[in-house]
Amino acid sequence: MILEFRVSNFRSIRDEVLISFVASKDKKLAEQNLLVTGLTGISHALKSLAIYGANASGKSTLLSALAYMRSVVAESATMLQLGQTFNIQPFKLDAAFVNKPSFFEITFLFNGIRHQYGFEITPERIVDEWLLVYKTSKPQQWFRRVFDEKLGAYEYEFSSHLSGPRKVWQESTRANALFLSTAAQLNSELLGPLFRWLAGQIIYFNAGFSPAPDYTTSLLQTDQGRQSVRDFLASADISIEEITSVAQKGVTQNIVFGPEGTKVSMDENEIIMPKFIHKTASGSATFELHEESGGTQRLYMLAAPIFDVLNQGRILIVDELDSSLHPILVRSLIKLFHHKETNPKNAQLLFTTHDTSLLDKSLLRKDQIWFIEKNKDQASTLTSLADFSPRETEAWEKGYLIGRYGAIPFIDGDLSFTQSNEST
């Protein structure tokens, strides 16, 4: 599970911001919303976090920072070639930060042990990289790699706890690749599992993006999978009597998010298409996916990824979770992560939203709600609702909408536009 994520000098984020899944000592909703860590000093972690903020406040930037870190871990050692640069964007509104490296660090629980991994990066190279492992209260620094600008070379520090051909891994690591990723590709028994966790555990959907329906459609090939999808849609009060599938020729879209940017490719092949059967007292009809409502389409596309995240105990990151979905349905999706019956593997959910109805004490705790806004320097800052110490009787939704916690748009008068009288 994720415990913390830190980032600085990335797009609208200038100074270091911290998003924490570490639970406070508050006992509210502990049974439903908390995970037991087994760690001394950090007894529980949160199953979900919600981020609120005005448009262009940095919500998407924070989520994409975590997704970017994952992509560098997953692809720097294999996808980039010697001399290629990273598509990294520092904070541009402060000259002192334009040429500084961007900073990423994640603290996570793996096999019951706390790990702290991070790196600093410029378009040309990895500037700094480190891994701390907390087998006791005192961390073991398994490795650190720092670029010395005066020498024009890297300096490495290794712990005796990191066994294996470290010299071979060091000499094989390019300037534009991570040591962790390179060592994993060269079969490090200790770093390989950490690499696979970081590369495969985080699933990210940016704003407006829905996964291809093929993932959910593939589940329709078995009776159990078809029933799971049907029940998932039925739980959202969508009146679908049955779901079937047929094979036909079509075009599939492949999207890869990497350190060089987003790559899209199209392939023509035979694909399986879902069919939705609706029945009423007056008769029945079969509809294709594109004929269903936008909300039904999005929910259908999310079904398989959500099943996978819950079944495998992954971390799902969704920008604008409420896009095209009714507030009650969004609430139901969050509860899937909160209930032990539907989340037996301790999956986690991190999402942004504008849906203020979720600011509900029966659904979320104070430490699960975060607000992001830009300061006078147009740099994004992040604050937890718990930091405002709201009164027990305080209505969070009302407090947010009147600006008590910040992170809302301030509009000078009504929105307006100027209409041109010129003819075209």
Image (cartoon, rainbow, N blue to C red):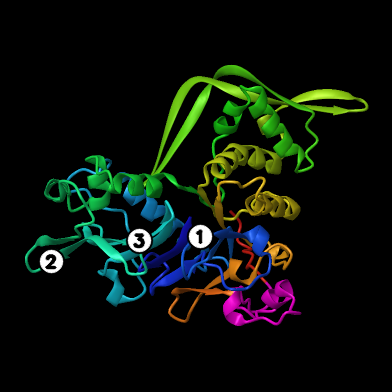
Judge left or right: residue 347 versus residue 238.
left
Q: Nearer the viewer, mark 2 or mark 1?
A: 1
Name the residue type under label 1.
Thr
Can residue 101 be found in the magenta stretch? Answer: no
Of labels 3 and 2, earlier in sequence is 3
Q: Is residue 199 left or right of residue 189?
A: right
> Which class describes the residues within 10 Å of circle 1: few (<14), some (14-19), or many (20+)?
some
Q: Main secondary structure of the magenta part?
A: loop
Q: Residue pushed farthest left?
A: 151
Q: CA distance from mark 3 to mark 2?
A: 30 Å
Q: Residue furthest right?
A: 281
Q: For the residue labelled by badge 2, is the local secondary structure a helix, a strand or a loop?
A: strand
Foreground: 360 or 107?
107
Question: Which of the numbered marks, if any, corresponds to residue 37?
Answer: 1
Instruction: Name the residue rendered at 46%, 64% in the picture.
Output: 39
Residue positioned 36% across, 49% down in the render: 71
When asked about the image quadrant of residue 27, the answer is bottom right
Amino acid identity at mark 2? Asp
Q: Which residue is mark 3?
A: 135
Marks 1 and 3, the one that precedes in the sequence: 1
| Residue 148 image label | 2
The segment highlighted magenta reads 385-414
Number of marks in the image? 3
**Residue 339 image point, x, y percent:** 67, 51
Q: Quadrant of residue 238?
A: top right
Q: Nearer the viewer, mark 3 or mark 2?
A: 3
Residue 313 placement (x, y as % from top left):
53, 46
Find numbered disc 1 in the image and state the secondary structure of the residue it sits on: loop
CA gap between label 2 and label 1 equals: 38 Å
Q: Residues within 10 Å of mark 2 (few under 14, many from 20)?
A: few
Q: At x 65% / y 50%, what residue is drawn?
A: 340
